Amino acid sequence: MKKYIFNIAVVLLALASFSACSDDDDNGGSGGGTPVVRYVRPCDATISDSLLTGGYLGSQIAIIGENLSGVNAVYFNDQKAKLNPNYVTGNAIIVTIPSGIPAEKEDLIKLYTKNDSCYYTFETLVPAPTAKTMTCEYVDDGDVAYIQGLYFIHEAANPLTVTFEGGLTGEIVSYDINNIAVKVPAGAQPGPVKVTSVYGTSESYFYFRDNRNIILDFDTKYADGGYNHGWHGGSGYGTDGGLTGCGQYLIFTGEMDDDKWDDSKFAYERWTYRTTDPDFFDSNNLDDYVLKFEVNIPDVWSAAALQVIFTGADDVWMNWQDTSNGGNPNNSYVSNSDYPRALWIPWADTGSFTTDGWITVSIPMSDFKYNIEGTNLNKVNAVGHYSGITLFVNGGGVTGTPCTPTFHIDNVRVVEAE
């Protein structure tokens, strides 16, 4: 990869900059004249009076000038931007700088109409690397972790590095602009990882071996003496092939089709004890949280959805410690078509799904808005309905094929969103 020297600071100009464009021809452009760029500014209304000589890849800018309505293509160096006709007028074009790294750094915006072109000096800036996700957030020392993100740029003189909690650097096995395979160093601790390139360092959105707010570890016994606190405990629990240091995992296994209701093998409940039990997280701010869990699916899954349903004491009437309501449990919320939940159906796009070992699943809490048939209810549960949780494979409003899947599930948690 060629090495490009970028001025990382975005320079704010006091005066408009104009270069490489001419407005001498009033008839060339299909918009009524040759396009002319006068200046570039941010789209943020709070700083829109600032002028820009450069911008980061992936950022949105406004190109201001004349005769711009006929522009049908915009390039930043050799990278073509996506134009929305609704954001192109005679005097302005709102456009996002492409995220691709230019093969040749010219520091030019190139505008084209049917008959004319216009070049304007503008520096494209590469951000620090961004580590967004890890295929599985629980990886043993010495094994390879797979990280996905943006701007993973490696140079011989400025090598790409991944640093784990505790200041330990992993050995990079392979990489490209959006992916890193890194061997986990001995002694790596739970926490975010840091990725460093020639353009800077950033901390990952995710936590490696995330141990925050785990609400189901399938090792903790509840007051009734079981690992579940409801009628169902799936097909049982296992440890073979599990995640190191994580103990038992939940097992679902058996025959499955689109309409099968087999809560003896494919359901698990942790019901709350009392109405005074608090929600697992700050449910006043659902948008700030995400549900995560690790799952291993070695056998083909091709029918029904994995439902995740949060409940409160009033939803399940499960107060055998407090018999004021008779102590009668009730799981009617599962089939209630007006009760919101999340549906995980990764096989829907391809017809079947398996994993190559354990993966981490992430579901925004704002996505807990569907019913059992997969209809978007356009609502989520209110505060007070998040002190219990149910996992159940059934329904989802999808059409699949009969299968005999196996699910291994561990480390169910609700954590702050990235």
Image (tube, helix red, strand yellow):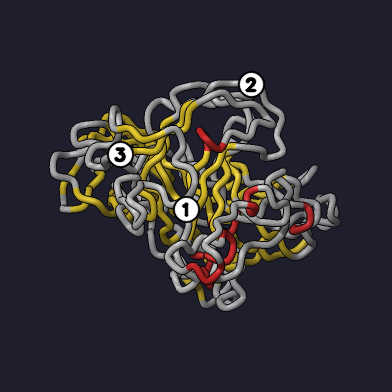
Q: Find the distance from the CA under tag 2 to the CA under tag 3.
A: 28 Å
Q: Is residue 156 visible?
A: no
* 349 w.r.t. 371: above or below: above
Task: Identify the residue under disc 3.
Answer: 248
Q: Is residue 220 visible?
A: yes
How many C-alpha atoms fall within 10 Å of the one at disc 3: few (<14), some, or many (≥20)?
many
Proximity of marks 2 and 3: CB atoms separated by less than 8 Å: no
Residue sitting nearer the eye, 53 or 220: 220
Which amino acid type corresponds to the residue marked 3 in the rendered image?
Gln
Across and down, in percent, residue 340 comes to 65, 56
Report the quarter where the N terminus lies.
Answer: top left
Is 44 left, or right, of 83 in this rendering? left
Q: Find the distance from the CA under tag 2 to the CA under tag 1.
A: 28 Å
Task: Identify the residue under disc 2.
Answer: 402
Which amino acid type corresponds to the residue marked 2 in the rendered image?
Pro
Residue sitting nearer the eye, 18 or 175: 175
Across and down, in percent, residue 101 comes to 47, 42
Across and down, in percent, residue 210 comes to 32, 51
The first of marks 1 and 3 along the sequence is 3
What's the residue at 84%, 55% (across, down)?
31
Task: Identify the residue under disc 1.
Answer: 291
* 213 w.r.t. 172: above or below: below
Marker disc for residue 359: none
Q: Secondary structure at mark 3?
A: loop
Is 335 left, or right, of 13 in this rendering? right
Residue sitting nearer the eye, 287 or 317: 317
Is 85 left, or right, of 242 in this rendering? right
The first of marks 2 and 3 along the sequence is 3
